[in-house]
Structures are given as structure tokens and as C-alpha cells.
Image (tube, helix red, strand yellow):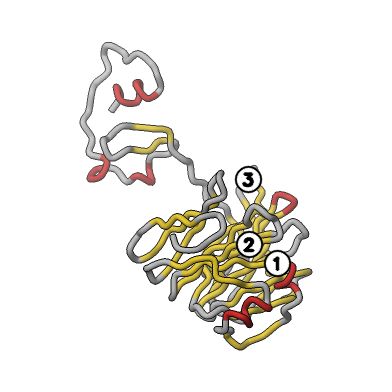
Amino acid sequence: LALALAAAAGLRADPLSRKTEADFYRDVSSRDLHGLATRSDGRLVAGPVMTELSGKGAGELLWCLEPAPGGKWLAGGGPGGQVLEVSADLAAGTYSAREVVRLGDRQVYALKSLPDGSILAGTSPGGGLYLIRGGKVATRVALPVDSIFDIILAGDRGTALVATGNPGRVYRVDVGRLASAGVSAERVSDAKALEGKGVTLFGEADDHNLRRLARLSDGRIAAGSAPKGDIYLFAAGGGAP
């Protein structure tokens, strides 16, 4: 172990160093390797250091974190459908959280902060897509899905892409048109009715859930699925993967 640490640090081992074989998967909890991590072949590499922050008001479950202006964070949680604003003092090791809004669904799985300060939120199990402005719900559209798991901005800042579950789909959202759609509790299944609210189908997958989205440098969209664990790649304009 001493030789391995010396090699990882780029140092010459002391001639009197003693080599000890250690099975990290059996003998050592990976959570005890502060600043180091082990690969599957046993090699030591630089790893993260996790520091617990003390504070109150973060809720029972936190599903997502999203950077917000002023060095703060937005957090989505449950089971009360909360959107929280979190401020952290890393030097003091503390955080504070305040409730921005409580949505009419049990879990908030996805948040996206928009340039104008408003927030897009996706919920479960009602599949609600929310636009939040000034701490209030400006728009709610219930998509024909059970859950919204991820939201990203497309190349055009006025357009967002939304990943859903049951079924696994990606929807394109015109944020400007969504802002004028109003608040509705009824699930919208008709494609033309959805389009009138600024939401159109971008693509769909042969799996129950699309959990994460990523926009590649050439504009294509990658999506990760569950429970099959597949990766789908869509053209920038959508369509079949």
C-alpha cells in the first residue's frame, strides 16, 4: 500500500517501505479513502473528498440540484413537491434552505433555471411540466406520461428538451409559448393540443424511462434509459433514434 501511494504521488519509495496487499473491495470501505479512489484493477487515482454540511430545511428527499444565480442552488424534492433555494457556506460547513414554491405533485425530479430567472420543473407521478416565475406557478401542463426526469436547454435558449418516463419520450418545449399556456390540471394527450401549449414530440425510445439527456457539440441529443440501461442518440432535429 505504501509503494502504491508513493507511485500515485509520483515519489520514489523509501527503501525501508513495507508493501502490504489490500483488497479494497473486501477490507476497506471506499468511503474511507478521502481524496483517493480505486479503479477495478486496484490502481489508486485522485478521488473526491465529501464533506457533510450541517443545516436545516432541506426536506425528506432531494432528487435534483440546479445552479442558480448568486452562487445558490435549486433543489427539487418530495414527497411534498418542493422546490428549494439552497445557500451554502463552504468555509463554515453549513447550508440554509428556503422553500421557493410547493407544486401540486409528490416528487420534483427535474429543474432548469432559465436566463430570465424563471424555472422549469418536472414532476412525478402526474407528469407535470411547470413554469415558475417570482415564486409562483405561471404554467402547468400535464404531459401524457407519469414522470419528467430531466430538462436541458437546446441550442436555442428559448427551447428546452424534456425526458419522460412511462413512456420513455423526449419532448421539445417552446418556452415562450409555454408561458402563455396557463395552469391546467388535466392531462393533455392530443398532439395538436400539446403543440398549442408549446410542447411537441421530439423522439421516443423502446424503454419505459428516459432518465438523462445530454446535448453533444454537433447538436445531437443523447438519452440514457431505464431499466434496460440503453443509450439513444437523436439527430438535432429529433425523430427516430
Amino acid type for the residue under numbered disc 3:
Leu
Pick the front one: 148 or 219: 219
First in sequence: mark 3 or mark 1?
3
Q: How many marks?
A: 3
In 3D space, how far apart are the residues under numbered discs 2 and 1 (Cα atoms)?
7 Å
Q: Quadrant of the C terminus?
A: bottom left
Question: Quadrant of residue 157 in the image?
Answer: bottom right
Label 1, residues with CA under 10 Å away: few <14, some 14-19, many ≥20? many
Q: Position of residue 173 (x, y in %)?
A: 64, 67
Q: Quadrant of the N terminus?
A: top left
At x 63%, y 87%, the residue is 185
Residue contact at pointers 3 and 2, CB within 8 angstroms:
no
Residue pointed to by mark 3 = 90
In 3D space, how far apart are the residues under numbered discs 3 and 2 (Cα atoms)?
32 Å
Residue contact at pointers 2 and 1, CB within 8 angstroms:
yes
At x 35%, y 59%, the residue is 229
Element class at badge 1: helix
Amino acid type for the residue under numbered disc 1:
Val
